[in-house]
Amino acid sequence: MTMTRRELLTTIGVTAGTGAMYTAMASLGFAQESSYTGPVELTGDPGGARVLVLGAGLAGMTAAMELRAAGYEVQVLEYREKAGGRCWTLRGGDTYTELGGATQEVDFEEGNYFNPGPWRIPYNHHAILDYCRRLGVELQPFIQENHNAYLHRSDAFDGKPQRYREVASDFRGHVAELLAKATNGGALDEEVTEEDRALLLEALRDYGSLTEEYEYVMSEETSDFRGFERWPGGGRNAEGVPSQPMDLETLLDSRLWRWLPDAETVHHQQAIFQPVGGMDRIAQAFEREVGDLITYNAKVVTLHQDENGVTASYVDAQEPGEVTEVTADWCVCTIPFSILGQIQHNFSGTKAQAISTMYYAGGFKAGLEFKRRFWEEDEHIYGGITYTDLPISLISYPSNDYLSQGGGVLLGAYNWGANAYQFNAMQPEERTKWVVEYGSRIHPQYTEEFKTGVSVPWHKVPWVLGCYGIWEDRERDYEETARMGEGERIALAGEHLSYLPGWQEGAILSALDAIQQLHERATQ
Amino acid sequence: MNPIKTTILPFALLAAGMATAQENLPPVEVPEGEPVSEFRTFDPTEEEFENFRGAGNIPHEGGEAVYNAVCSGCHMPDGQGAVGAGEYPALADNELLAAPGYPIYMVVHGQAAMPPFGSLLDDQQIADVVNYVRSHFGNDFVEGEFGEAAPEDVAATRE
């Protein structure tokens, strides 16, 4: 008898403990989704060494929390009046002033919110999930893929949005039919053995809900996937009436298939989560741990290191005047390079090059509150995402408070590139006007139900000047920039020092790597 | 179907005055075979039609239009720049704009936190916007010793 992989692992777990099991799992191809292998262990006494942490986003607060626990004396400098950085949520009563001076006053109902930055956490982002676990941040499922949401292009189906399930089912069915025809027609005889051809045909029939003759047609079976003309019910007159699939040419020409794989990348596939109440619940949880270490409204203006330590100076972010100098033995700098590049520093070589050449992506998001949850009430869309070729790119429905009375907040736009630049150049009311205008082409209820909106183009965000860092030449500069060089006392961290740009997981993993390097130096 | 048509079409119809924006007005007349949704929340002005014509490029023509559609987001409508944790430099009264080579390079390749716009703007657009900032906001360099930026200068900078 051969053991299954699971049986083998259970045996190892029982006899050798979980550590051995983890190693065994890794060698068998499990558990390699992240470099996170559990809470960081910083053993050895740093002897009260002082660490200056620059930035109180997730990277900075991770570093501060773990370094204090390891025995360091920690001080954190933060530009904003609160912690979190891009881990940020806007709620009713909040105000936000962007570069250029425009202030938006958020007028959402109690309980409604909008995450201008990160908004979801995939199952394989082990580090941030573990911090949520340790810090007691409650998570709930984020609906990424909703078969009842829409796919929309202005030039397809007369601009009428199509249900995701119809496009997905029909695309799968037609592709299965074509492949079955090709297989039966002998087109694959060179590629597939006779035995496998039979298996392939069987698989295609299952996969595409094909008939005995390998055709994708209107039927109860195909309607079980794409939806019915009249849905099955109960009581009298309850029999379902199948719906007619769209033909292959229409489907291909529509180009709606381009969004089908979006929810299937490892960063978007189920299970994927959001914190209950807004992404900044994570920031708040960290802040509860390390808030006493943070100096707020501190705008760093210089940063220097030498063989003896680190010296930084800062001014008040609102009323710059008096310069305060801070010294420490070590430093974890999480300041985005868009800003670090403008601070007087003495990095050199590759690091200086990376700092001065990293540019920041533009990204734009808008949160719209409507007087009622018409997407649920009228269209039976509970969470998930509608994709469109309009400049708003997508509409995402709240993955929480389903069926509740009162208003709800949609993500009304989330775009990049040329569209984001143009939204960035607009004032808040103008942005909202366009977002509502475009969204109304998918949901006509917008016109009647719109209540208020708030939007954030990331190039106008004062504390980061962009959305996430883009390397001029990552292959050339990354490793050396992420490594504490010989004699250096500053470790760099943040999402920009990860291969998960823009993800909170990247920020935390880079912070953990930075403090491990720092700790190794400090306890040598 | 031509993908380029996707976002142009509704605006083209709007431009032709076929759409209505005010509430309670009759729905848009839809020419046969021309897809457009009938809902409108406002009437974009002629200038506004220029927005968002393509996800991968900036449709605006002329230095002022390009500046207002893109550059003004960070350098601000008055060219004064903005200051946060870091800053966007002011273009107003900026001697660095005296010769066209530097601003052309900046727009094409980006620098520091500034993204490159070489793939979003064509040679003419870049030359136009460079000349615009060199002749506005207190700058008077187009008439100066270095003269105008030409599309050919932009093309050379791309290489």
Image (cartoon, grey):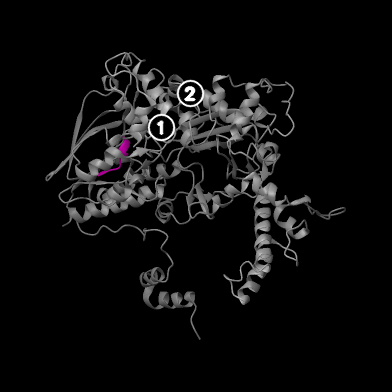
Q: Is residue A159 above or below residue A95?
A: below
Q: Is residue A470 above or below residue A245?
A: above
The x and y percentages for residue A295 are 28, 35
Q: Which residue is mark 1?
A: A459
Q: Quadrant of residue A188?
A: bottom right
Q: Secondary structure at mark 2?
A: loop
Q: Amino acid at mark 1?
A: His
The x and y percentages for residue A41 are 29, 59
**Residue at the extreme front:** B152
A185 and A271: which one is in front?
Answer: A185
Q: Residue at x 65, y 45 (%)?
A: A253
A346 and A374: which one is in front?
Answer: A346
**Residue at the extreme right:** A236
If the image is split into quadrants, where does the C terminus of chain A sit? bottom left
The x and y percentages for residue A126 are 42, 56
Q: Amino acid at mark 2?
A: Glu
Q: Quadrant of residue A471?
A: top left
Q: Which residue is mark 2?
A: B61
User: From this viewpoint, is residue A278 visible?
Assistant: yes
Q: CA distance from mark 2 to mark 1?
A: 23 Å
Tell if the residue under mark 2 belongs to the same chain as the one under mark 1.
no
Residue segment shown in magenta: A332-338
Q: Secondary structure at mark 1?
A: helix
> Which chain is mark 2 on?
B
Q: Check disc 1: other Cα within 10 Å, few if <14, some if 14-19, many if 20+.
A: many
Q: Residue at x 54, y 36 (%)?
A: A413
